[in-house]
Amino acid sequence: MKIIKTISELKIALEEIGRDKSIGFVPTMGYLHDGHLSLINEARSQNDFTVVSIFVNPTQFAPGEDLDAYPRDFDRDSRLAAAAGTDLLFFPDPGEIYPAGASTFVEVAGEITKKLCGQSRPTHFKGVTTVVNILFNLIQPNRAYFGQKDAQQVAVIKKMVRDLHLPIQLTVCPIVREADGLAMSSRNVFLTPEERNQALVLSQSLAAAKVLHESGEGRVKTLKDQIIGQISTMPLAVIDYVDILDFETLADIETITAPALAAVAVRFGSTRLIDNIILD
Ligand code: AMP
């Protein structure tokens, strides 16, 4: 596995691969876990060459969020990425991606970036779409891999690719969970044992909503109330949002008649966790 820090080295490495080879790209912020590795495996199985980026993107963090505290361990990450079969690991410094004076952003406008995480993180998706665009431009992958764990991010990036006619095929990989159901996340490391225990209510309440929906309940308010009620039984849980929206467009719905996304964000202490399930 080649480790590359600069854009000039990246260009040389990509020229060496040659344009006839397919490139699969997995963007990450590092502190890799099995969720990330599932994306790398999928990329490897579908492409000649697999590129992984590790970049804790400053523009998707608002002032006061956990940019500085975000967990980082490059040595461990590079071992895991190499063992997973990554061919090229791109690990740029912020100044490489955002040269002095950079002031151009890519923003998906509209409701899709305003609801769910967009409510408490109004500038987040602008940072995500900007950096994903920059990375797409630099790497020019044939395919890019994202996790359903970040369901709104997937919807926003799909829209960006469609709106800008980007010649990249997106693949969305299922949520990888710990054995007890907690969705894997780099931020799980911040949870105290008690918070970690109570955080199980996210996946449990979503699974219970799916059972209720499958038993014939299609009313969004009823399903949401059940999720909120179950999460609220945990004294350390502070709900940021619980919502059920159209799966494709993230439009508001009152009853489920097409695939829907049930998504939650909950704080435990200073750690904010997200999870979701598809109600089909
Ligand atoms: P991050 O490093 O958190 O920015 O995540 C990088 C990519 O890995 C994103 O596409 C995430 O959606 C995906 N990812 C993170 N956690 C999981 C998980 N538990 N299961 C599947 N994909 C994940």
Image (spheres, helix red, strand yellow):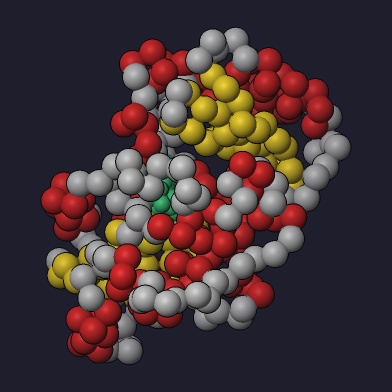
Classify residue 257 as left or right of residue 230.
right
Please report the residue visible at 53 percent of the width from the left and 35 percent of the height from the top: 275
Classify residue 240 as left or right of residue 175.
right
Residue toward you, 134 or 66: 66
Q: Is residue 173 visible?
A: no
Residue 197 drawn at (x, y percent) = 41, 15
Quarter containing the N terminus: bottom left
Residue 226 sits above or below residue 182 on the image: above
Residue toward you, 168 or 126: 126
Quadrant of residue 116 within the rendered picture: top right
Please report the residue visible at 53 percent of the width from the left and 65 percent of the height from the top: 129
Residue 44 drawn at (x, y percent) = 30, 63
Residue 57 drawn at (x, y percent) = 39, 58
Quadrant of residue 185 within the rendered picture: top left
Classify residue 222 as left or right of residue 76.
right
Residue 73 sits above or below residue 139 on the image: above
Please report the residue visible at 57 percent of the width from the left and 62 percent of the height from the top: 126
Residue 227 sits above or below residue 34 on the image: above
Residue 221 drawn at (x, y percent) = 81, 27
Q: Is residue 27 visible?
A: yes
Classify residue 24 as left or right of residue 93.
right
Please report the residue visible at 75 percent of the width from the left and 47 percent of the height from the top: 246
Quarter containing the C terminus: top right
The count of marks equals: 0
